[in-house]
Image (cartoon, helix red, strand yellow):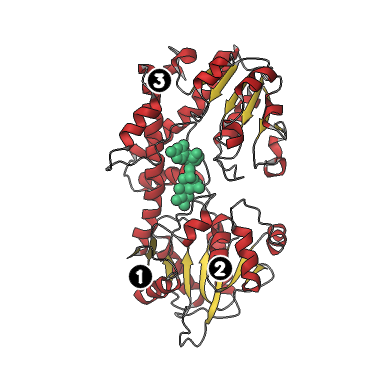
Amino acid sequence: MTDGARDTADAHLIAVVGCGYVGLVTAVGLAEQGMRVRAFDVDPVRLAACRELRFPILEPGLEHAARLAGERLTFHDVHEEAWPDAAFTFIAVPTPQGEAGYPNLSMFRQVLMWIADGQSRASSENVIVVRSTVPPGTARWAQAEIQRLMGEAVPVVANPEFLQEGRALQDFREPSRILIGSENREAADRLRELMAFTSAPVVITDTSTAELAKYGSNAYLAMRISFANEMARLAEREGADPLVMLEAVGLDPRIGSRYLKPGVGYGGSCLPKDVAALVSMGSAVNEPMELMRATQEVNDLQRRRIIRTLADGLDGLDGRRVAVLGLAFKPGTNDVRDSPGLQIARELLTAGADVVTWDAAVTPDLLAANDAGLSITNDALEALRGADAAVLCTEWPEIVDLDLSRVAEVMEGTLLVDGRYAWDRSAASDAGLDLVRIGSPRVVDGTAATV
Ligand code: UDX
């Protein structure tokens, strides 16, 4: 960043509001590039941990990079400190799924109020950057709202992120693209200059286009996964190999092989929420989003299939001991938001099963109070001990690489449900285990229509 001739804004200071996944990675990523960053949050417990560089999220390299940034990165409580006169203020607060799938923007609104209430006056020298995923029109509305509250024209720029959990810092350093939506060209150029540390292609457009592109990107990934899941089910029925079939499809360079891995369905904090938001946005403007609805339906079906397969294979779930292997929504993270494994565990518990779980990163303190019925063991084999059946929900290497003959020794029953197409079929059958993948006709034959 260069020293601009700004009278008001501290040209060297960046504020990041929200110390969740997106905010922490943005704050650390910018501090690592030599910028002075103040990261803000509302949660004193989270802030205390962040100050000690014990981040609440599991993200490779993040704490190390924060340590190297030293005093350039500091953490602050929005209840104790006013908005600083930062050149850039990144808003990275959650926009969770609200009523009828529409994102809940209440935290986002509160940040605007906090900026407007600041002792320093924001002006056209300050740029507000929306990193949160927000519906089209939000940045434009925020700019009007700031103007209404402060009487100043402060540029609000949409700058969606495409960070994948587990490799988010790497994605920040080397993004696939920088997307800047702005009604103010000078503000867009300033943000582009700030991001000049990467050689990624830059798309500069209006705010609504940038905002919708973020939803489009996540929705397309979700749709591919549902496509892979639906095709894999049909392959099982036809006696075809789902993985080889999808590999062959993905080798077409027009298609590509990523996000075609079938399994228990997509989860996490973004894909399910963003697909639901598109369904809701479409119905608000009378534009039915049929592909998005089907994407959701296929995703839900995967989990129902697993429960049904277990119930059929065990002749009922009540009193059955089931090991759920994997609670994080994917390997490499401790995030359980919209996690297929956790949802399956909860449903099994509700159906009366005795549920024992294991995960490489999820610890009991990360679960909600109403998940107290789920026991988490320290070791995957321990979770399997005495189990009537087991279900693989997250492809952690520790689970995929389990010695299936040892698994057979410790389990009471023989049913393994592989929710990630990860275990070897012949190794399972050599061990005397009954391995069922999602959609396998052996257990659910004839029942698919009723699942
Ligand atoms: C996603 C987007 O990838 C990212 O660009 C955006 O910024 C946030 O949302 P993330 O939530 O970290 O990132 O998850 P991702 O790695 O995309 O996986 C999403 C889900 O899809 C996981 O549950 C994963 O297990 C599942 N998945 C992914 C599949 O089932 N099959 C695949 O082939 C790929």
The residue at the point 36 percent across, 54 percent down is 213
Q: Nearer the viewer, residue 3 or 92?
A: 3
| Mark 3 Cβ inside 8 Å of ligand 1 | no
Find disc 2 in the rendering and name its residue: 32
Find disc 3 in the rendering and name its residue: 236
Question: Circle 3 sits in a helix, a strand or a loop, which is it?
Answer: helix
Find disc 1 in the rendering and name its residue: 183
With 248 as the anchor, is 190 left or right in this view?
A: right
Which three-letter amino acid code belongs to the residue tagged 2?
Answer: Glu
Label 2, label 3: how many angstroms apart (C-alpha)? 48 Å
The residue at the point 38 percent across, 17 percent down is 237
Which three-letter amino acid code belongs to the residue tagged 3?
Answer: Glu
Disc number placed over residue 198 in the picture, else none = none
Provide residue 161's location: percent of width, then percent of height. Answer: 45, 58
Q: Quadrant location of residue 292?
A: top left
| Mark 1 Cβ inside 8 Å of ligand 1 | no
Q: Answer whether labels 2 and 1 touch (C-beta < 8 Å).
A: no
Q: Looking at the image, is 413 positioned above or below residue 218?
A: above
Q: Looking at the image, is 300 positioned above or below residue 132?
A: above
Mark 3, residues whose alpha carbon is within 10 Å: few (<14), some, or many (≥20)? some
Q: Nearer the viewer, residue 225 or 281?
A: 225
Question: Circle 1 sits in a helix, a strand or a loop, which is it?
Answer: loop
Label 1, label 3: how many angstroms apart (C-alpha)? 51 Å
With 287 as the anchor, is 104 left or right in this view?
A: right
Mark 1 against mark 3, which lies toward the viewer? 3
